[in-house]
Amino acid sequence: MKKLLSIFIILIYHNVFALSLQEVSLHLKTSLDTKLKDSNKNKPIIKEIYKAFDNQPIWVGDSTKVSTLIQTLKNPMYNYKNKAFDQKSIKKLLYYLDNNTISQQKKALVYARLDLLLTNSYIRLVKFITQGDVDWDLVQKKLKSLKESDDISAVWEMRSKTIPSTKSIISSIKSGNIISYLDSLIPMKDRYTKLVHMLIKYRQMDKFPKIAYTNKILKLGDRDSRIISIKKRLQITGDYPKDIKINNKFDKALQKASITYQKRYLLKVTGTIDKTMTYYLNQPAKKNIKSIITNLDKTKLYPQKFEDEHIEVNIPDFNLRYYKDGDMISKMGVVVGRIDRPTPLFENSIKYMVLNPTWTIPDNLIKRDLIHVFRNNPNYLTEHNIHVFKGKKEIEITPDMINEYEHSDKKVPFRFVQYPGDDNALGRIKFMFPNKYAVYLHDTDEKNLLNRRYKIYSSGCMRVDKPFELLDILLSHSKKSYDKSDIDKIIATNKPKIIRLKKSIPMHIVYFTVYEENGLAYFKNDIYMYDKIIQESIVGRSKPTFKMPKNRFIISN
């Protein structure tokens, strides 16, 4: 098909020189005013582009340039949603011109029409690569509405992009460097490219075989007729080797494939196959495809790449990754905000760490949690080393003194401060990136939470699995030098100690439910339903409001 299209284009450009390019230009000048509808948002850009070319044809006369553009319009690297971009109309005009079905008198007009279509399509493609087709303003509106409908304060700081300068678009056309220009516009290029390759792979996959449900748990050594379907299913996604003959025995290769699959979908890693895993195996490929596309849409909110050294916390993945010079040098689990108290998504920089931190309990948590607990257990404050202050003076307090604030808009007139210690909610370290949301990374006194399947137990802050490993990395940037014995001595004092960094480390809190790592595709649960909100906010087929489903998913270990 590609070769046939090239032949069409070459033949057309043999024909076009039989016409006067001046005649085509005259039709172009007229068409810019008569054929371009005012509703076309690209009209001002198109007119500016043609002005830069003295209203001469841009594409007509250059078969290589046309062929390149047509291929990019259908290339999933740039058009992963298979958007039309007038491709049918372009193809139809090319066909008519090639088969001489258009009279000589109208050919110049058709060439002008073709040139305009190609220019408009190119601009639309550039816009799609940089901006996508999600109404991010509508997404924000829906996120804010969750406060009223579900008492959820959902925060996602977004930076929607503007279309690249018309000057840069003109330059790419003049130079003919269309592909390199489009490549330069791709956001989060490494992640984006992996997602596109994943999308191509899943679109080409065979239909998944249906696997029968049963209460029997399949394990190593078992023989069962279902195992044949399971192996075929896992072969399609690359979990089970394609060069192994399929039979009905649960062999070591299937055990290994089951473990790989369970890790990819955040299932309990057992190496056996139960009803839960069968449910996931029976999900259609189109569900994966939809998730991949949504995550490609999210890349539009980010630059081409993050800093050479940075921290990324991916909320649905419950992991923190530390990157340096393009390599991941550390990975650790994190506990994130509950589904009704989501961790805000934004970017900042870690500026200092605090050893033996105190914890001043936020007003909203005093009202939501502490007042109720204190009322049921008057000794709670003493048991958890929490001190109460009015101004700078420490005072004794009873539940009766704060009950009235539980459901009030008034601020609680006391400060509740948990002193340093092993039972401090922040553990022994907190990593500070001062922000208006009062969230940060920190150690935890509840280490068991890091072993849960869905690590959604905080009130917005992020509890780190390996805080001392993270501390050790960051100490390479501290203003003073500290070794392990220094840190141990500070911890032993049980007194707060601030360690400042001479270089702030950028930190990005993101929300990617699909990613590729070590050659494998990982699919995570849409814990905050942000993917669903995005999918229902596509321009042209959006829903004006969002309703949070009552049953979202089952929390289990």
Image (cartoon, helix red, strand yellow):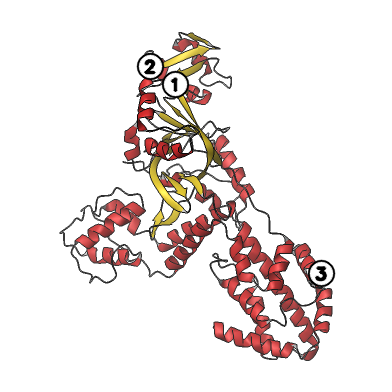
User: Of the residues under marks 3 and 2, which one precedes in the sequence?
Assistant: 3
Task: Give the quadrant of the C terminus.
Answer: top left
- Nearer to us in this view, 387 or 5: 387
Disc 3 target residue? 51
Residue 118 shows in the view: yes
Q: Relative to 139, is 503 above or below?
A: above
The image quarter containing residue 141 is top right
Circle 1 packing at 10 Å, graded few (<14), some (14-19), many (20+), is many
**Location of residue 210 in the rendering, given as x and y in whole percent from the top left corner:** 32, 64
Residue 41 shows in the view: no
Disc 1 target residue? 370
The image quarter containing residue 81 is bottom right
Residue drawn at 65 percent across, 85 percent down: 9
**Kind of residue at badge 3:** Lys
- Nearer to us in this view, 200 or 188: 188
The answer to whether marks 2 and 1 mark residues whose Cβ atoms lie closer than 8 Å is: yes
The answer to whether marks 1 and 3 mark residues whose Cβ atoms lie closer than 8 Å is: no
**Location of residue 322 in the rendering, given as x and y in whole percent from the top left corner:** 44, 46
User: Of the residues under marks 1 and 3, which one precedes in the sequence?
Assistant: 3
Disc 2 target residue? 380
**Location of residue 423 in the rendering, given as x and y in whole percent from the top left corner:** 36, 23
The Cα atoms of the two marked residues, 3 and 2, are separated by 75 Å
Task: Give the quadrant of the N terminus.
Answer: bottom right
Residue drawn at 73 percent across, 62 percent down: 166
94 with respect to 390 (left or right)? right
